[in-house]
Image (cartoon, grey):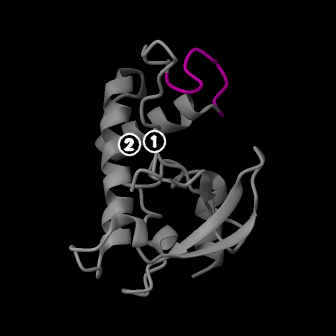
Amino acid sequence: MSDITDGDNLAGMRMGFIKDGYTYDAAETPKFDFDGNRKPYSGRGDSSPHTKWARHTAAYAQLHGVPQEDVTEEMLYAEADKQRTALVNLLLEGHDLGYDADELEVDVHKVGVGVHGRDIIVLRNPKTGKIINQELNTPEFNSDYWNNYNVLGRKDNK
């Protein structure tokens, strides 16, 4: 489970979708420099509406009914913890809790390479048959759920 750093990453690979028209992004967990100081949230201080900060604060505000300007890093980090926990729980579902965590069964299907050179993957829990990417494609777990690209994909793929 140490390979899961955020709710959308597994061992350096990024979760995505097989079909075009979907986007998936979880809130960021805190990142630290070599001295142990917490780095600012990705994109914070940049005025572009396309940064992680802008998209994630907008998603949090919409989900929780608060003004976007009131959303703090701490709120997003708490959201990231919930999203990461949901991913872990979906991976563990159906497995014997006495297992060795390094032997966890999960089907990993590479569907492409992302803009930053990371593999884009779809995860399936072979014990439950659940496609984890689809299970997490909800407003609660996908910070890009209301992204126009994702909305169009959901409509086209129903």
Quadrant (top left/top right/bottom left/bottom right) for the N terminus = bottom left
Local secondary structure at mark 2: helix
Residue 71 seen in the current view:
no
Q: Is residue 140 magenta?
A: no
Residue sitting at 33 percent across and 59 percent down?
86
Type of amino acid under label 2: Ala
Circle 2 crowding by C-alpha within 10 Å: few under 14, some 14–19, many from 20: many
Above or below, 95 against 90 in this view is below
Measuring from the top left, give residue 23's x and y in whole percent.
Answer: 62, 57
Residue sitting at 68 percent across and 61 percent down?
120
Judge left or right: residue 27 versus residue 115: left
> Residue 81 occupies which quadrant of the picture?
top left
Residue sitting at 45 percent across and 41 percent down?
27
Residue 80 image label: 2
Judge left or right: residue 92 versus residue 45: left
In the image, 135 versus 63, the foreground residue is: 135
Above or below, 52 against 139 in this view is above
Quadrant (top left/top right/bottom left/bottom right) for the C terminus = bottom right
List the residue tagged with mark 1.
27
Measuring from the top left, give residue 155's x and y in whole percent.
Answer: 60, 73
Judge left or right: residue 39 versus residue 62: right
In this picture, which residue range is highlighted in magenta? 41-50
